[in-house]
Image (cartoon, rainbow, N blue to C red):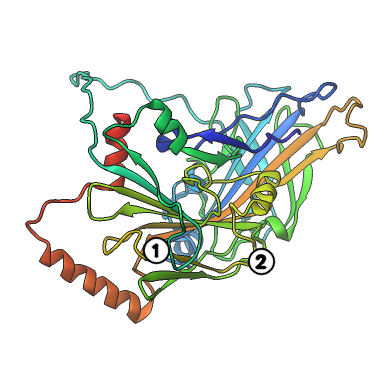
């Protein structure tokens, strides 16, 4: 499997609806696609006062038994930002393009018995009544600006911020402003003939203490025999990230727990400065909006961006948001830990890259942990409670004042969504 090279791209309106997903690269000359392919996405989400110990209702659901019911799981939660630990699986077979079901044997430390993969049913029929006419209205042109800051430290660096005046900006201005990095490939996905887990027939929750480490095997009509592989500890489910904050002379010191299997970290914040301006900040040493970085990235891309100091080294557990960026209005914080992507194939690729290669099966496994919160609100212990109290008091003081535009409202105004 030839990895897609990391790219610097221009973020368009599509990225705001869904993060960029780059399809797999065309196979190299002399290399045929595998007879069977599996994609496994693993995610741990936390923050915003959400439970830190696992998926809600998972323990009770396990006590009641069965594969469906209370606390049911659903495909796509690795992208949902819902608190908990999630796994999405997709498998396909070239010999059986209409594959309806398959099984994935997993270690007992994950779930037992084997996972039942099912092909998604057809899309639901159209609504019985069609009484909502679609009308296109040109969006009101925003009057504010977009400000981009970057880099960890207590002070705003010279030459910042990067400014986009939305009232006067043209297409070229937008293209220059929304330059970002992304190397997100296709992962677990819904498609005809490609069974997935979880699904309505097997919607078991991932237990709080689950582990994927150990031997896995796929089977099904058209899936070749011997589709077995090991998931090492480096690709196991990540623990939840815990993001702490502390004020320091107007700046905000961020700290988080170290994850031993993290390959790198990245932090971003988005908010308002109290005017009509949308404000963005990232932990990168280079100007980057970060829109494409809050998702799985290839190992090669992570390594390159570590050298460029776009991402934070795996030993890093601290970063400071400079004072004076968001003022008293704060913003939304997000922190991602990139796991070590696993790409396996059998037989392995020959050392001679020009030699003919026909893999029987291949697996792509991706891992991440993400947490979010509000800048200026730790959300942990008395300090977080006190800050929430101050925030509530401030809301009472500002009742009746004009409502400030929210960041996503500004984006919708820009792109007409």
The percent position of residue 93, horizontal first and vertical second, equals 70, 27
Res 220 → quadrant: top right
Compared to 13, does 317 lie above or below?
below
Image quarter in which the N terminus is found: top right
Residue 84 appears in the picture as rendered = no
Q: Which residue: 22% across, 51% down?
A: 275
Q: Check the image and report above or below for 417 versus 155.
A: above
- What x and y, as percent, mark residue 147? 36, 47
Q: Nearer the viewer, residue 182 or 78?
A: 182
Q: Earlier in the sequence, mark 1 or mark 2?
A: 1
Disc 1 or disc 2, which is closer to the eye?
Answer: 2
Q: Which residue is mark 2?
A: 260
Query: Which residue appears at 68% of the width and 47% of the height?
Result: 304
Badge 2 element:
loop
Q: Residue at x 40, y 35 (%)?
A: 17
Vertical position of residue 363 compared to residue 221: above or below: below
| Residue lying at 25% horizontally and 42% vertically, measured from the top left | 144
Q: Is residue 381 visible?
A: yes
**The residue positioned farthest toward the bottom in the image shown:** 382
Mark 1, Cα crowd under 10 Å, few <14 / some 14-19 / many 20+, is: some
Quadrant containing the C terminus is top left
Q: Which mark is residue 77?
A: none
Looking at the image, residue 327 lies above or below residue 220:
below
Q: Position of residue 315 (x, y in %)?
A: 65, 67
Left or right: where does residue 124 sit relative to residue 34?
left
Q: Residue furthest front?
A: 158
How crowded is the residue under tag 2: few (<14 C-alpha within 10 Å), some, or many (20+)?
A: few
Indicate left or right for 408 with 86 as reference. left
User: In the displayed structure, does residue 120 sit left or right of residue 138?
Assistant: right
Q: Are marks 1 and 2 in contact (CB under 8 Å)?
A: no
Q: Which residue is mark 1?
A: 50
């Amino acid at each position: 499997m030839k990895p897609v090279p990391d790219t610097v791209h221009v973020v368009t309106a599509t990225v705001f609806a869904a993060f960029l997903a780059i399809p797999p690269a065309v196979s190299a000359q002399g290399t045929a696609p595998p007879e069977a392919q599996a994609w496994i996405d693993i995610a741990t989400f936390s923050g915003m006062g959400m439970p830190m110990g696992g998926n809600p209702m998972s323990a009770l659901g396990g006590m009641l038994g069965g594969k469906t019911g209370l606390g049911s799981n659903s495909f796509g939660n690795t992208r949902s930002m819902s608190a908990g630990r999630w796994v999405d699986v997709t498998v396909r077979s070239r010999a059986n393009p209409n594959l309806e079901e398959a099984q994935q044997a997993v270690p007992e430390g994950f779930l037992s018995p084997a996972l039942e993969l099912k092909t998604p049913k057809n899309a639901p029929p159209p609504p019985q009544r069609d009484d909502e006419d679609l009308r296109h209205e040109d969006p009101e042109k925003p009057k504010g600006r977009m400000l981009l800051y970057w880099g960890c430290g207590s002070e705003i660096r010279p030459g910042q911020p990067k400014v986009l005046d939305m009232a006067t900006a043209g297409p070229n201005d937008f293209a220059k402003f929304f330059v970002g990095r992304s190397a997100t490939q296709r992962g677990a996905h819904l498609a005809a003939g490609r069974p997935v887990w979880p699904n309505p027939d097997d919607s078991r929750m991932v237990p709080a203490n689950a582990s994927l480490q150990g031997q896995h095997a796929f089977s099904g009509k058209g899936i070749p025999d011997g589709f077995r592989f090991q998931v090492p500890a480096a690709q196991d489910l990540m623990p939840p990230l815990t993001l702490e904050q502390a004020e320091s002379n107007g700046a905000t010191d961020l700290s988080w727990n170290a994850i031993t299997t993290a390959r790198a970290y990245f932090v971003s914040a988005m908010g308002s400065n109290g005017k009509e301006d949308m404000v963005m900040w990232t932990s990168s040493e280079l100007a980057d909006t970060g829109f494409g970085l809050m998702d799985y990235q290839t190992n090669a891309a992570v390594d390159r961006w570590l050298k460029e100091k776009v991402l934070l080294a795996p030993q890093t557990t601290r970063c400071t948001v400079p004072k004076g960026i968001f003022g008293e209005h704060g913003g939304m914080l997000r922190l991602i830990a990139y796991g070590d992507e696993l790409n396996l194939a059998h037989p392995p690729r020959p050392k001679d890259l020009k030699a003919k290669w026909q893999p029987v099966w291949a697996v792509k496994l991706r891992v991440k942990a993400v947490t979010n919160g509000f800048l200026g609100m730790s959300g942990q212990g008395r300090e977080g409670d006190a800050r929430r109290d101050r925030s509530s008091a401030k809301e009472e003081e500002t009742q009746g004042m004009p409502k400030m535009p929210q960041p996503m409202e500004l984006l919708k105004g820009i792109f007409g969504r």
